[in-house]
Image (cartoon, rainbow, N blue to C red):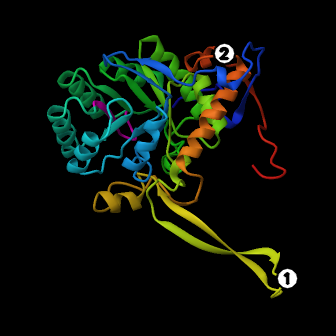
C-alpha cells in the first residue's frame, strides 16, 4: 500500500491569474491551431473541442454542427457499418470526425472494413475503453498502427504519466485522459478509482508533449471556464458529453415534467404550474446502456454509469458560440494570441471558492 501525499486539483480548485496583455479585442485572438501529430502524417487545423462518443452526443447530427466550427465529434461505437459508410461518404469527415471502437472483434472488423474500402473518407480512430491499463488496449494500439500507419489514433482512458507514455510510444497520437470525472460516471463511487481532472492534465500533458504526443481531457467540464482551464493546464483537446446532452440536436428522449411554483395565479388563486422539458442522458457503463446496446449487463460487471434527465438547453450552435466566446475572452485575459500558446501564458491560483452563488451558479 502506498499513499501519494501531494495535493491533487480539480477545475473547481483553481482560478486563472489575469496578466498584462497587448491584445485589445477578443477578435484579435486565434482559437484554432494546426495540429501536428507524432505518428499520423496529416495536419489538421481546428479548435480542440470534441463531443464525446456517448450514444446521445456522439451522433451524426451533432457531428455536422461540430464540423461547421472546426470542432470535432467522436461518433459512438454502436452505429451499424452501413450507416457509418453512408455518413462518411456523404459528408466531409476526414478531419473532424472520429470513428470509435472497443475491444470486441466485431468492432475491429467494422473499422477495418471502413479503413480498407474507403481510405479517403475518415481515418480518425478512437479506441475507447474505460480502463486503458489492461494489456489488450496496448496490443490493439500496436495492431492498428502497424496495419494502418497513416491513421490518426486516439486511445483512452488513462490518468497517469506512465501509461500515457507507453500508449504514445506504442502508436497512439492522442491519449484520452480522465477516469471517473464525467457527469454520468459513477466509477469513483463504485470502485474508488480515479484522479482529479486538473492534476491529471498537468502530469499527462507534460509527459505526452515530451515525446511528441498529445492528450485529450475527457470529463469534468461544468462551465465554459473549465474548458479554458483544461487548455491552460496543457490539454490539446477537451472532450465533453453531458455539456452537450441537453441540446435539441442531441439524441435522447424528451420528457416533460410539471412543477408547482411559488407564484399564485391572480385569476384562479391557485399556484402556477410550470412545465419543463428534459432529455435523457446516460453513461455508457450504466446498466441502461448495457441493456440498450449489449443485450444486458454481464453478471461479472457492476453499473458504473447513471441515467440522468438533463434540462433542455440552447441549440448546439449557440453553445459552441458561447464556448468560443469564452475561450477568446480567456485568451485576452492571459495575453495569448494563439490557442497553442494558452498553456504557456496560464498561471493558476489555488482557491477555496471560485464562484459567488448568492443568486445561483
Disc 2 crowd rating (10 Å Cα; few below 14, some 14-19, many 20+) is some
Q: Quadrant of residue 40?
A: top left
Residue 41 drawn at (x, y percent): 30, 16
Q: Quadrant of residue 98?
A: top left
> Residue 317 versus residue 330: which sits nearer the camera?
317
28 falls in the magenta region: no
Residue 273 drawn at (x, y percent): 71, 77
Residue 49 appears in view = yes
**Mark 1: secondary structure:** loop
Judge left or right: residue 93 versus residue 186.
left
Residue 184 drawn at (x, y percent): 51, 51
Seen at 46% across and 11% down, the residue is 210
> Residue 17 versus residue 250: which sits nearer the camera?
250
Seen at 47% across and 15% down, the residue is 209
Residue 360 drawn at (x, y percent): 78, 52
Give the extent of the magenta segment: 123-132
Q: Which residue is mark 1?
A: 266
Q: Which residue is mark 2?
A: 345
Seen at 53% across and 60% down, the residue is 308
Q: CA distance from mark 1 to mark 2?
A: 56 Å
- Comes first in the chain, label 1 or label 2: 1
Seen at 55% across and 26% down, the residue is 201
Above or below, 150 relative to 99: above
Amino acid at each position: 500500500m502506498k499513499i501519494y501525499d501531494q495535493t491533487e486539483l480539480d477545475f473547481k480548485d483553481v482560478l486563472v491569474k489575469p496578466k498584462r496583455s497587448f491584445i485589445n479585442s477578443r477578435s484579435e485572438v486565434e482559437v484554432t491551431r494546426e495540429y501536428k501529430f507524432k505518428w499520423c502524417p496529416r495536419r489538421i487545423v481546428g479548435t480542440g473541442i470534441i463531443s464525446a462518443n456517448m450514444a446521445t452526443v456522439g451522433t451524426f447530427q451533432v457531428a455536422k454542427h461540430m464540423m461547421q466550427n472546426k470542432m470535432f465529434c467522436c461518433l459512438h461505437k454502436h452505429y451499424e457499418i452501413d450507416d457509418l459508410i453512408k455518413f462518411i461518404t456523404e459528408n466531409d469527415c476526414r478531419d473532424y470526425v472520429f470513428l470509435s471502437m472497443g475491444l470486441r472483434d466485431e468492432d475491429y472488423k467494422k473499422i477495418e472494413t471502413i479503413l480498407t474500402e474507403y481510405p479517403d473518407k475518415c481515418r480518425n480512430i478512437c479506441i475507447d475503453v474505460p480502463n486503458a491499463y489492461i494489456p489488450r488496449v496496448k496490443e490493439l494500439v500496436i495492431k492498428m498502427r502497424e496495419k494502418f500507419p497513416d491513421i490518426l489514433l486516439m486511445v483512452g482512458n488513462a490518468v497517469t504519466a506512465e501509461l500515457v507514455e507507453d500508449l504514445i510510444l506504442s502508436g497512439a497520437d492522442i491519449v484520452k485522459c480522465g477516469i471517473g470525472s464525467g457527469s454520468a460516471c459513477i466509477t469513483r463511487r463504485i470502485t474508488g478509482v480515479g484522479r482529479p481532472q486538473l492534476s491529471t492534465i498537468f502530469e499527462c500533458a507534460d509527459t505526452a508533449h515530451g515525446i511528441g504526443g498529445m492528450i485529450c481531457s475527457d470529463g469534468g467540464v461544468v462551465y465554459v471556464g473549465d474548458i479554458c482551464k483544461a487548455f491552460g493546464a496543457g490539454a490539446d483537446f477537451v472532450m465533453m458529453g453531458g455539456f452537450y446532452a441537453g441540446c435539441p440536436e442531441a439524441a435522447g428522449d424528451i420528457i416533460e415534467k410539471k412543477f408547482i411554483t411559488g407564484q399564485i395565479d391572480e385569476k384562479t388563486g391557485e399556484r402556477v404550474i410550470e412545465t419543463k422539458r428534459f432529455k435523457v442522458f446516460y453513461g455508457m457503463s450504466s446498466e441502461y446502456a448495457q441493456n440498450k446496446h449489449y443485450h444486458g449487463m454481464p453478471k461479472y460487471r457492476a453499473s458504473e454509469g447513471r441515467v440522468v434527465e438533463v434540462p433542455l438547453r440552447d441549440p448546439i450552435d449557440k453553445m459552441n458560440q458561447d464556448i468560443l466566446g469564452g475561450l477568446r475572452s480567456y485568451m485576452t485575459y492571459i495575453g495569448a494570441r494563439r490557442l497553442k500558446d494558452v498553456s504557456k501564458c496560464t498561471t493558476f491560483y489555488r482557491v477555496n471558492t471560485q464562484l459567488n452563488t448568492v443568486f445561483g451558479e
